[in-house]
Image (cartoon, rainbow, N blue to C red):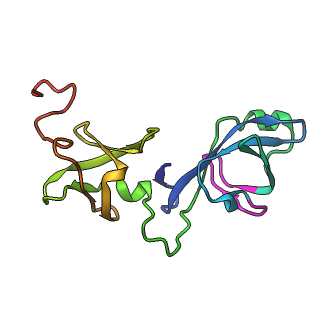
Amino acid sequence: VDGRPSHDGPVLLEVGRIDKPHGLRGEVVVSLITPRLERLAAGSVLQTDSGPVTVQSSRPHQRRFLVRFDRITDRDAAEGWRGVVLSAPPVLDADDDTLWLHELVGATVVDQHGTSHGTVVALLDNPASDLLELADGRLVPLVFVVGHEPGVRIDVDVPPGLLDDGYVEGREDAP
């Protein structure tokens, strides 16, 4: 998931990717990386680096989706959209526990003792738990996040030793 401003400034979140063409009439296979299936509802507008696309229809297909977009009319056109990232503005609802990438990157990680451990520079995919990557290379599993102030602070409750400042793999001054 990616939180980046569009050319006009609002934050867009990566919601999926066009994988490949399907058939001859311009349908494409889309991998959706959000649980919000309404992103692919007919009439939904998604952003790409080449401008907006409007969903004309979509249907489930082998754990992905077959989607027809307004700007993709045949297989040849669909080939040119292979690998294109689909983005959309965040859907805001009453779920205050939702963590958004654009709210995490740039925030300072503070442990249960009030110690600041650095700034989040990325969120890494990991099978056990997504990982916050700090500027100095340390990794913090997302399961230890207990609270956050979007874009400012991330509170974590970590086991002893996880964020010891004396150890960062690959650093010359590491013990």
The correct choice, above or below, for 11 with respect to 162 in the image is: below
How many labels, in total? 0
Q: Residue at x 43, y 71 (%)?
A: 96
Residue 161 spot, x, y in % from top left: 16, 41
Magenta segment: does it hold 17? no
Locate residue 117 relative to residue 86 in the image: left or right. left
Locate residue 81 relative to residue 59 in the image: left or right. left
Dividing the picture into quadrants, the one containing residue 138 is: top left
Locate residue 57 relative to residue 81 in the image: left or right. right
Q: Residue at x 42, y 66 (%)?
A: 97
Q: Residue at x 21, y 47 (%)?
A: 159
Where is the C terminus found, in terms of image quarters? top left
Q: As drawn, which residue projects farthest toward the bottom? A: 94
Residue 44 spot, x, y in % from top left: 72, 62
Magenta segment: does it hold 52? yes
The answer to whether residue 3 of the structure is visible from this angle is yes
Q: Which residues are magenta?
A: 41-54
Dividing the picture into quadrants, the one containing residue 37 is: bottom right
Dividing the picture into quadrants, the one containing residue 155 is: bottom left
The answer to whether residue 105 of the structure is visible from this angle is no
Q: Main secondary structure of the magenta part?
A: loop
Locate residue 151 relative to residue 26 in the image: left or right. left
Comparing 150 with 9, the one in front is 150
Residue 168 spot, x, y in % from top left: 19, 32
Q: Residue at x 59, y 53 (%)?
A: 34
Comparing 156 with 135, the one in front is 156
Comparing 45 with 175, the one in front is 175
Q: As drawn, which residue projects farthest toward the front? A: 159
Residue 119 spot, x, y in % from top left: 25, 49
